[in-house]
């Protein structure tokens, strides 16, 4: 049996080096892909989740990787909010008694005239329905109900998640028959700063390596 942890922001693969550079917890699709590639045939995988969520596209990609996979179990050990909550809907879900799910609307921003604002609004509403469909498929509840719950940002306890069909078991009680909280930890400004610092570091490293090659240590 192997375990892969979903921690920190859920991010695209291209953001991973920035989070690693800043020593921030994060999870990207390649992390999950790597864990799946290491499984032996028939080996169990525990997906240990404690994340505030993150980028929708990355969450959807991870959900797609794990959806319907045999021998995969999700264990929510803290919170599974926003995109992290969506990911858990890909399979069998066990929750610790004090853990929670949180569902809410997709957020984004736009610049331009009212046509651009309308397009952005329509896109966000479409993404809401796409994410809600994961909860609907898992629970059997009506899509419209889940969209309403997302619209008012809903926190769900472990026991309530089982009752609603979003989870299958509260750990320690046996089976019961029945998206970030805020912005990413790394802001665009921090990303630009990290890129500049890494470029400066790489230049100094190249100078040092050239000096060693020419003159020795």
Image: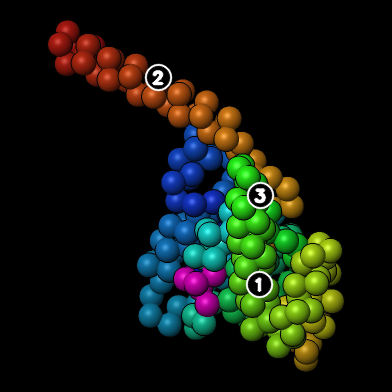
- Name the residue carrying label 2: 200
Q: Which mark is residue 114?
A: 3
Q: Is residue 66 inside the magenta stretch?
A: yes
Q: Quadrant of the C terminus?
A: top left
Q: Position of residue 143 (x, y in %)?
A: 71, 80
Left or right placement of residue 58 versus residue 118 in this view: left
User: Comparing marks 3 and 1, which lies closer to the viewer?
Assistant: 3
Structure colour scheme = rainbow
Residue drawn where x is 60% and y is 38% of the image: 186
Q: Secondary structure at mark 3?
A: helix
> Which mark, residue 129?
1
Tell me where the magenta segment starts and ends, as one range.
Answer: 63-67
CB contact under 8 Å: marks 3 and 1: no
Figure check: 22 above or below 47: above
Assign a secondary structure to mark 2: helix
Q: Residue furthest bottom?
A: 177
- Determine if the magenta segment contains residue 30: no
């Amino acid at each position: 049996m192997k375990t892969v942890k979903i921690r920190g922001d859920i991010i695209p693969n291209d953001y991973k080096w920035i989070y690693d550079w800043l020593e921030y917890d994060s999870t990207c699709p390649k992390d999950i892909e790597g864990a799946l590639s290491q499984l032996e045939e028939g080996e169990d995988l525990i997906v240990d989740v404690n994340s505030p969520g993150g980028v929708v596209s990355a969450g959807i990609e991870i959900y797609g990787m794990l959806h319907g996979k045999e021998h995969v179990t999700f264990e929510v050990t803290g919170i599974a909010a926003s995109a992290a909550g969506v990911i858990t809907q890909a399979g069998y879900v066990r929750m610790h008694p004090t853990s929670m799910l949180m569902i809410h609307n997709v957020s984004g921003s736009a610049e331009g005239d009212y046509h651009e604002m309308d397009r952005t609004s329509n896109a966000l509403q479409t993404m809401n329905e796409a994410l809600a469909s994961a909860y609907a498929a898992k629970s059997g509840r009506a899509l419209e109900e889940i969209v309403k719950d997302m619209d008012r940002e809903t926190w769900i306890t472990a026991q309530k998640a089982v009752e609603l069909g979003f989870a299958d078991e509260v750990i320690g009680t046996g089976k019961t028959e029945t998206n970030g909280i805020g912005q990413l930890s790394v802001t665009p400004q921090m990303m630009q700063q990290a890129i500049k610092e890494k470029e400066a570091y790489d230049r100094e490293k190249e100078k040092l390596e050239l000096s060693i090659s020419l003159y020795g240590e």
